[in-house]
Amino acid sequence: MKLLPPLPSIPLSTIYLHPDGTRLSLLRLDQSDGIISGNKWFKLKYNLEQLHNGEYQALLTFGGAYSNHLHATANACRQLGIPSIGIIRGKHFRFLSDTLLSVRDMGMHLHFVDHQEYRHRHDIGYQQDLCQQFYPHFGRIYLLPEGGSNTLAVKGCAEIIQHITSPFDVLCVPVGSGGTLAGLIHGLQQHEQKQIIGFSALKNELSLEKRVTELLHNFPPSRVNWRINHDFHFGGFGKAPPALLTFMDDFYQQHHIRLDYVYTGKMIYAILQLIKQHTFTAGSRIVAIHTGGLQGNQKVSA
């Protein structure tokens, strides 16, 4: 079975230079592989290999109405001829989001659950019950956590470091489920002088630090200096107030680079604000990860 194709070279674009010498560059993972773009390619890489080697017949995963993970996973499964199941947070949608319409069109079976049930998505017993529920129709099921964040995703996301071709001091990444941040921390474990900042796309999700730490449990201890900034969520996951959309439009007019409103728009806004506030040491070389997910811009909600 054909797995994900190898990645082409990924561009690194300088987008801002402050008078104090601080430089911000953007690693364009959104340019990596069409619909399966950004960090999702790295998260899926080893999980799809494990699915294939384990002789599973289908893949089951979790997400909300604007989940980039669901979109990338549905597309990968379609390309590989693997049936996919999405456990969707929420049962009473008046209209399906463009993301859910797209994943449904790509063949993913959508199973809607209420918010109370969805809270059990990390419970082993609940996951086993789901696999048993869908087994008669789909066969042996490979379960992928919400956001695709597990040990194999951390292993894959650690390889993002290999695509950064210029020296840097600070690495920035948006955070949803924590897998990409954990992978970057693991990938930089031999470089204690580096700093990694994750920018949460969720409101008041202060358990993210614990989640990242748990994802790193199976890897050698890292002394990398990392933290998560929770101050630039713009109202919460999937929210796109006018100020954020205006910033994204202005950014595109200036740089001809599209950002997504769920993750990268918030992160770039935050970094530029922090640079102007002199939060970073003068002359810092900052690299931000563009994690893709541009299909989510088709429809926004303020």
Image: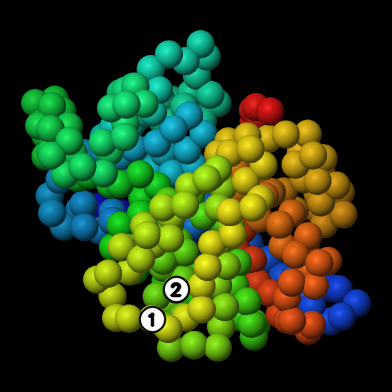
In the image, residue 264 lies at what x, y percent? 64, 52
How far apart are the alpha carbons under marks 2 and 1?
Answer: 7 Å
Kindly identify the residue that appears in the image at 39 percent across and 75 percent down: 186
Which residue shows up at 53% across the image and 24% down it? 97
Badge 2, how many Cα within 10 Å: few under 14, some, many 20+? many
Disc number for residue 222 = 1
For label 1, the SS is loop
Count neighbours of disc 1 (C-alpha within 10 A) and say few if under 14, some if 14 to 19, many if 20 or more.
some
| Residue under pointer 2 | 185
Label 1 amino acid?
Ser
In the rendering, at what x and y percent does residue 188 appear? 46, 80
Point out the residue furthest to the top here: 94
Colouring: rainbow
Give the left or right position of residue 157, taking residue 260 as reference.
Answer: left
Foreground of the two, 231 or 87:
231
In contact (CB < 8 Å): disc 2 and disc 1: yes
On screen, residue 12 versus residue 56, left or right, reads right
Residue 168 falls left or right of residue 111: right
